[in-house]
Image: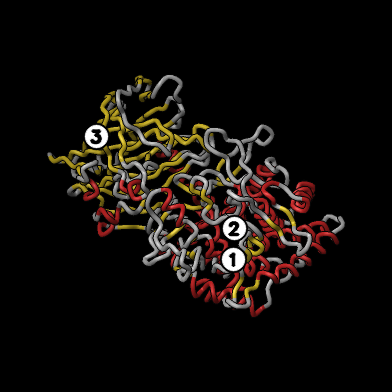
Amino acid sequence: MGIEFGRDICGHLPTSEAREWLVTNGNGGYGAGTVSGVLTRRYHGLLIAALNPPLGRTLLLTKLDELVQYRGQIYPLYTDRWADGSVAPQGYREIESFHLDGSIPVWKFAIADAILEKRLWMQPGENTTYIRYTLHRARSPLSLSLKALVNYRDFHGETYSGDWQMKTDIIDGGIRITAFAGATPFYLFAEREGNNVLPKPQWERTHTWYKDYNLTVEKYRGLSDREDNLYIANLEVTLQPGNSLTTIASTMQFPTLQGEESLQEYRKRDRALLDRWYKTPYLFANEEQKNTVPDWIKQLVLASDRFIVDRTLPDEPEGKTIIAGYPWFGDWGRDTMISLPGLTLCTGRPEIAKIILQTFAQYLDRGMLPNLFPDGTNSPEYNTVDAILWYFEAIRAYYAATQDIHFIRELFPALEEAIEWHVRGTRYNIKVDSKDGLLYAGETGLQLTWMDAKVDDWVVTPRIGKPIEINALWYSALVLMAHLAKELGKPSERYEAMAQKAIAGFSRFWNYGMGYCYDVIDGPEGNDPSLRPNQIFAVSLPAGLAEIGGSSLLLPREEKSVIDAVAQSLLTSHGLRSLSPDDPNYAGVYGGDRYQRDSHYHQGTVWGWLIGHFVQGHLHVYNNPTLAREFLSPMEHHLQASCVGNLSEIFDGDAPMTPRGTFAQAWTVAEVLRAWLLTR
């Protein structure tokens, strides 16, 4: 679908190592690396398994070092950077091209007149990675040697080998690796295709630590940039033209070993995702709409599936959730609910949306939804004011797409209870102010909104009081409750009255002196006049409420003024800045150690997901779909940078707006796809 690089990108190390790839398995496990093959992050590896799905992610197979012998010459195809900064070998020079086949990364290596193809994917639902080599063109046989470099650590950590000895056992068709007593064993297998005469490939055991890999991105992030990996096994095969070799790394003792069969099933799955999308009636009204979908939007549909993973519960074995971002985030309540419409409803999979909503309903507590499930404990943490409010938004979108009144009837008591908790007060001083009908939240030392950076005891943007987006969401939830009550034949008057009071109170957000909205009112230091993007929700959210009885929160001239102010000071090619460059607290570059990064996270850094609500608000104010869609076009280019075929979490506020943070972010993908559909 159009994403392909030649030697101009692949053969230039600074550009090829800045472009990354991602494969996932639907249970939280993944594989990731650079186009060049050089390791730049602690999060790179061919198999990072979710040992406690969707968490417990553990680096197992770091890389395969490929060495080719062809017509008397030796060609290393891998690239390493070492502690002294040297790069050796420089196998990236042999990469002729890189492209995505659907969601599958594919390399072609040019070795004299021979072409060796490498492609990589994971088995859905299993911690299993396939790496397949096919000799497409050659005058004579080619010898391929593979060194397997392994590890066994939490994906956030780093390894310094010391005297660590891993145990290996030869098994039928492969090798079993046990990192230490009590560790989950994992396996390496290999299958040759196209020549049944030659003996079956067999891994040979070794045990040599390769020390001091240099992880340059980790250095930029102020973290340890050294890593050791264990050379655990070697495999040597001879490939005839047309032959393939599939290597398999897995925590399964008996994974599917037929590489071609697994590959075709995976490609079939990609095609089925797109076919399902095209056949969704509420997304496509006619053939013309289907025929005018650009390739980059199709790529987003495939990317959306990378984030949807299993979260089984005792009474919900088919439970689902959303990974907030790769390579390091887990499933967060807020991110899940913001992402849900774009990743599921906008891809024609409302049944997955329903499962996710059901899954998270199990965790409702005192009217709140958990923000995250920490690795290690897997126990929900309730430290967000807006996760439950985005849950209401997700339900609104689900019902608009499906009219599933039976599910709404099932959820309605829980929704009523959530509203009641907010009226009488729940954790962290979250409660409705009876004077103006607005929602107050916050206590000293806590960060409850999406601007949630905290360094030790320092909350960077505490936003205690009445944040504007929280109250836009609160109003939206009340309008939805009134509508659903009517649909279910229940009393709606109380919710309608609360919504009207919230509208009246919302007028207090307007800053007459500045011509846009306060970010927070009634805070410890009064009203916050900082020009931030949160006011965009006061325009975008009501725009989606008209069909269920909602009204605008601002006057038309105020809505226009908000859009224009945001466009002038916050809009960039890839999203909205989190703070105006004119503010003395503005930070235009995101980097450095944890203190530096977190202190800049919401002080000017650009957030990709906000472009969706800017486009929705702009469309509402200016009613120009063509113009609104133009704001999304830079994301097409970004699909070819950073993580190829995906969209980043954040970007520098200063030009050239370098991508930062997670290289594949659920809500960025979701919101760009949702906004594109809105602009049709």
Asked which colour scheme the image uses, the reply is secondary structure
Task: Indicate the secondary structure of the residue bearing disc 1.
Answer: strand
CA distance separating discs 2 and 3: 57 Å
Q: Is residue 170 visible?
A: yes
Q: Residue at x 54, y 66 (%)?
A: 532
Instruction: Say what amino acid the circle numbered 3 marks.
Output: Ser
For mark 1, what is the residue? 528
List x then y, in percent, for residue 304. Answer: 52, 52
Instruction: Say what amino acid the circle numbered 1 marks.
Output: Asp
Q: Residue at x 76, y 46 (%)?
A: 414
Q: Which of 106/436 is in front?
A: 436
Could you tell me which quadrant the N terminus lies in?
A: bottom left
Q: Is residue 676 visible?
A: no
**Mark 2 / mark 3, whichever is N-terminal:** 3
Rate crowding at label 2 as few (under 14), some (14 to 19) or many (20 or more) other CA atoms within 10 Å.
many
Q: Which of 153/284 is in front?
A: 153
CA distance separating discs 1 and 2: 9 Å
Whether the residues at callouts 1 and 2 have beta carbons within 8 Å, the answer is yes
Report the disc number at residue 101. none
CA distance separating discs 1 and 3: 62 Å
Task: Indicate the secondary structure of the residue bearing disc 2.
Answer: loop
List x then y, in percent, for residue 546. Answer: 72, 69
For mark 3, what is the residue? 145
Question: Which of the 4 image quarters holds residue 174?
Answer: top left
Q: Nearer the observer, disc 2 or disc 3?
A: 2
**Mark 1 / mark 2, whichever is N-terminal:** 2
Report the disc number at residue 463. 2
Q: Which residue reaches farthest front?
A: 525
Q: Which of 290/52 is in front?
A: 52
